[in-house]
Amino acid sequence: MREDDLFDEDSSATLFRDVIMLALAGFVTLVMLLLPHINPKAVAEDTSKSPGNMTVELRWPDEINADVDLWVEAPGDVPVGYSNKGGEVFNLLRDDLGDTADLTGLNYEFTYSRGVPKGEYAVNVHLYRNPTGIYPIPATIVVSLKRPGQKSAKQILVSKHELQHQGEESTIFRFNLDEDARLVTGSVHNLPKKLRNKKT
């Protein structure tokens, strides 16, 4: 075999290797350029945003199969609870019946407001049904407020209450907000006020 033939064979192999490497580099570059468009970056959801201006939450132990109800009333509006899920200000977002038709396993009720008018607000809990017979039922009630111009809600009131018997309705909070949606100092109390079956 002549030396020229070896040289031709080496240059052909080098040329073939170079063409393959360039094609591979081009393919990798194309994939890198297309990847951001195939899988765009997810926009992080702001979980600190509240669905309404005021939220009221009720929790009781998940292992107790009881139907505890949350009732709220805004100034000049009708009480909102399981039998009246919406008013002008508040809406009941979740009516929890205990284990009945509940895929989450959580005992949780939640209401929110559209706006925060000046005046007195009331928050009650009511033990509608307790087939387990477990007493007392500890409940935690939290009120959070997002004032106009704020991005997220801040917890303004929290209380724990023990429900002692079926049919009990207890006032947890009564409080006033001023025209700037600020909690009025000294306005928080729990003097009883019936909200369930209230005549409007």
Image (cartoon, grey):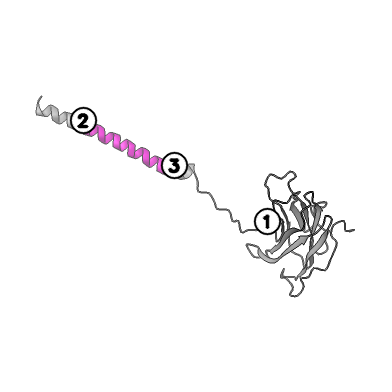
Res 192 seen here? yes
Give the magenta range.
11-32
- Residue 45: % across, % down: 58, 53
Q: Label 2 sits on what residue type? A: Ser
Examine the rendered structure and indicate whether residue 103 appears above or below residue 136. Answer: above
In the structure shown, which secondary structural element does the residue marked by tag 1 occupy? loop
* Mark number, residue 31: none
Q: Earlier in the sequence, mark 2 or mark 1?
A: 2
Front-most of residues 116 and 194: 194
**Rendering quarter of residue 147:** bottom right
Res 87 seen here? no
Q: Label 1 sits on what residue type? A: Pro
Which residue in the structure is indicated by mark 3? 34
Residue most extreme to the bottom:
186
Q: Earlier in the sequence, mark 3 or mark 1?
A: 3
- Residue 192: % across, % down: 84, 66
Q: Label 2, label 1: how many angstroms apart (C-alpha)?
A: 69 Å
Residue most extreme to the right:
199
Examine the rendered structure and indicate whether residue 147 appears above or below residue 32. Answer: below
Q: Label 3 sits on what residue type? A: Leu
Q: Quadrant of the N terminus?
A: top left
164 inside magenta stretch: no
Instruction: Report whether 145 appears left or right of 8.
Output: right
In the structure shown, which secondary structural element does the residue marked by tag 2 occupy? helix
Which residue in the structure is indicated by mark 1? 51
Q: Residues within 10 Å of mark 2 (few under 14, many from 20)?
A: few
Which residue in the structure is indicated by mark 2? 12
**Rendering quarter of residue 123:** bottom right
Residue most extreme to the top:
1
Residue at image position (29%, 37%) is 21
Instruction: Report whether 147 appears left or right of 2.
Output: right
